[in-house]
Amino acid sequence: MHKTAFSLALAGVAALPALGQAREISLQTTLKEYRGNEAYLAIYVTDAQGNYQRTLWVSGKKAKYYKHLRDWVRAGNRPAEYDGLTGASVGSGETLEVAVELEDALIDAGYEIRIDSAVEDKRDQRAEIIVPLTQQPTTVSGGTQGYVDSFSYQF
């Protein structure tokens, strides 16, 4: 009896990687030159309708300023979801480079990467960057408004 239960448990463990495979994605966000304090960024994944799925990275360690990353906050994420996915804020003209794990099921399935940005005493930028999440390396330029000059990702 114990031998059968052990074999079933091993079979279940062997099947787990197939259910939740992930790969590393490298994200690079370069800010425009601007006057003012360092920027807070929320980089997150949504479905095609803009519904929040998960946070990839938060730039800026003081949680009291996260409220200015409005679309990301409105999504209802919780600190436990992005705990360990935070780093220092990013200054004018600087580049943020991070590597995070991303589930294979989100790639080429209609999901998008979005970036909200905020700078103290300046306008907050909701969904400043919206880019489809595909297997192909992608680079986009920021718009005329906002703080992001360019964003790219690759696997």
Image (cartoon, rainbow, N blue to C red):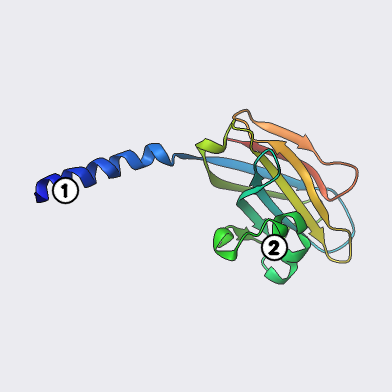
Which residue sits at x=68%, y=50%?
43
Whichever of labels 1 and 2 marks the residue nearer the N terminus, that label is 1
In this rendering, the answer to whether 122 lies above or below 19 is: below
Which residue sits at x=65%, y=59%?
76
Please tell me the numbered disc located at residue 60: 2
Closer to us: mark 1 or mark 2?
1
Three-letter amino acid code at the position of disc 1: Ala
Label 2 neighbourhood size at 10 Å, few (<14), some (14-19), many (20+)?
many
Image quadrant containing the C terminus: top right
Please tell me the numbered disc located at residue 5: 1
Question: Which x, y percent locates residue 41?
Answer: 73, 55
Q: Is residue 33 left or right of residue 79?
A: right
Three-letter amino acid code at the position of disc 2: Gly
In this rendering, the answer to whether 121 lies above or below 146 is: below
Q: Is residue 146 visible?
A: yes
For the residues labelled 1 and 2, say whether their Cβ atoms are less than 8 Å apart: no
Please give the count of numbered marks on the rendered protein: 2
Query: Disc 1 versus disc 2: distance between alpha carbons?
Result: 48 Å
Front residue of this view, candidates 148 and 102: 102
- Tag 1 secondary structure: helix
Quadrant housing residue 113: top right
Q: Is residue 12 left or right of residue 17?
A: left
- Tag 2 secondary structure: loop
Q: Is residue 84 visible?
A: no
Which residue sits at x=83%, y=53%?
125
Question: Which x, y percent locates residue 148?
Answer: 80, 47
Which residue lies most toward the top here? 136
Front residue of this view, candidates 124 and 86: 124
Question: Which x, y percent locates residue 35?
Answer: 90, 59
